[in-house]
Image (spheres, grey):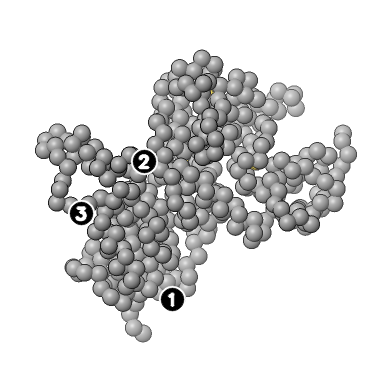
Amino acid sequence: MSKPIELTIDGRKVVAEEGETILKAAKKNGIYVPTLCYLEGVSSFGGCRLCMVEIKGSPRLFASCITPVAEGMEVLTDSERLRRYRKWAVELLLAERPHVCSVCVANGSCELQQLATELGVDHLRVDREWTDYEVDLTHERFAYDPNRCILCTRCIRVCDEVEGVHTLDLMLRGKNSKVVFDLDENWGFSQSCTSCGKCSAACPVGALYVKGKPLSEVKKKDLVSFIMERRSGK
Amino acid sequence: MAKVRLATVWLSGCSGCHMSFLDQDEKVLELAEKIELVYSPIADVKDFPENVDVTLVEGAVGNEEQLELLKRIRRNTRILVALGDCAVNGNVTALRNSLRNSDEEVLKRAYVENASINQAAPKQVPRLLKRVLALNEVVNVDAYVPGCPPSAELINQVLNDLLEGRTPVLEGRFKYG
Ligand code: SF4
Ligand code: SF4
Ligand code: SF4
Ligand code: FES
C-alpha cells in the first residue's frame, strides 16, 4: 500500500492514499462534492468545473476530480464563492444548447437539471443558443440528440475505456464541438458500434438514450464502476 | 392597509401558469382580501393600468404586440415576476428559435404544411418576432418562478412573500425545468 496522506476537508481530518484525487478522498469520507463530467471507473479530464474546491494558500480554484491530495492540504468543498462559480457553470451549460426540460426525455432523471435545482438556478443570466442539430434516430435501439449534449465526454470515455471500441469521439472545437460516431456516421450505420448501450447509461442528460424506455431505467451512472470493479477482481 | 395592486398577464404561453395560479383553491380567497386585481385575462380591463405593485407575467415574448406590452408593464410595475418556464427562459414557446427564419417558418409549418384546408398563413395577427425572447431578454425581471407550470403552492408562497414585502428566496423550493 502507498503512503498515507493526511489532509483536512471542510475542517475534518481525513487520511487518503498517495496519488488519490481530492474528490475521491472526499467521497470516501462521505463529503459531497457536485460533479458532472466525472464518472467513477473511467479517466477524468476536469472539463465541467462543477467539482471545484478551494485550497488554502492559493487564490485559484481546483477541479477536485483531477487534483491529487497532498500532505497538510486544507480543502474547502463548499463556500459562497464556490457556489457562485458552480451556478455559473451550470447556467452556461444550460445556455449553450436549447435545454427545454418540459419536453425532454430526461426530465426528472437528468444530472444537469438536478444540479440546477440544487444550486438554485431559477433563470439564465446569458442569452441562449438555439442549435438545430438533427436528432439521430437511425439506430434500432438508441437515439442521439446533440441539442442536449453538454460535451462532458462521458460516453466517449466509456466507449473507449470500458467497451474498448472508441466508436465515439469529438468533432470540431469549442461550442461547435459535437460527439460523433465513427467519422461522423449516423449511429445506425456505424461499423464499429457493438450496440452495448454503455454510452446511454453513462450520459448524464437527455442526449443519448434508449428508445421507448423511461430514462430513469436507462441512466445507470454506477454501471461503469460496477463493471470496472468486477474486472479488477475486487 | 391599502390593497396591493396586482396584475397578471398572459403572453405566449399555454395558460397553464394561470391555471396553476387559480389552483391555489381556497387560498385565492385569502389572496383576494389583500389584493386588487387591476389587470388579468380573467378580468375585463382593456389597457394595462398605471401604478401596479406586482405583475405576474406568464409566457415568453413572441410578437411585436407582446414586446410593446411588456415594456409598458415594466414602466408601470414596481415588482415584475416571470411566472413559469416560458417567461423565465422561453421554454416550449421558444423551440421555434431553432428553425431558420423561425417567424415565417413556424407559420408555414402550422398553417400550410400541416393544414388540410385553407392552406395559408394568417395575416391579421401581430407580426411574430424573429426570435422568441424570455422576459429578461427584454426588461429587468425582479423575481422568477420556474416550473412548467410552477406549482400552485410555489406561486402562493412567492405571492405571500411579495405581499409581505419580503424578497422571495426560491432556493430549495423548486425543481429546475
Ligand atoms: S437534458 Fe436535462 S437539462 Fe437538458 S432539457 Fe433535458 S432534462 Fe433539461
Ligand atoms: S453502444 Fe456503441 S457507441 Fe455506445 S458505448 Fe457501446 S459501442 Fe460505444
Ligand atoms: S452525449 Fe451525453 S455523455 Fe456524451 S458528451 Fe454529450 S452529454 Fe456527455
Ligand atoms: S467533475 Fe471535475 S471537472 Fe467535471
Q: Is residue B107 left or right of residue A219?
A: left
Query: What residue is rendered at 39% in x and 36% in y?
Result: A132
Q: Amino acid type of disc 1? A: Glu
- Disc nearer the start of the sequence (2/1): 2
Q: Is residue A50 left or right of residue B128?
A: right
Q: Amino acid type of disc 3? A: Pro
Query: What residue is rendered at 59% in x and 22% in y?
Result: A166
Q: Nearer the viewer, residue A74 or A186?
A: A186
- Disc 2 C-beta below 8 A from ligand 1: no
**For the residue labelled by badge 1, is the local secondary structure a helix, a strand or a loop?**
loop
Q: Residues within 10 Å of mark 3 (few under 14, many from 20)?
A: few
Q: Which mark identifies residue B126?
A: 3
Percent coordinates x, y for residue A103 in the rendering: 38, 42
Q: Which residue is mark 1?
A: B164
Distance (Cα) linking label 3 and label 1? 38 Å
Q: Are marks 2 and 1 on the same chain?
A: yes
Query: What residue is rendered at 38% in x and 73% in y?
Result: B78
Q: Amino acid type of disc 2? A: Ser
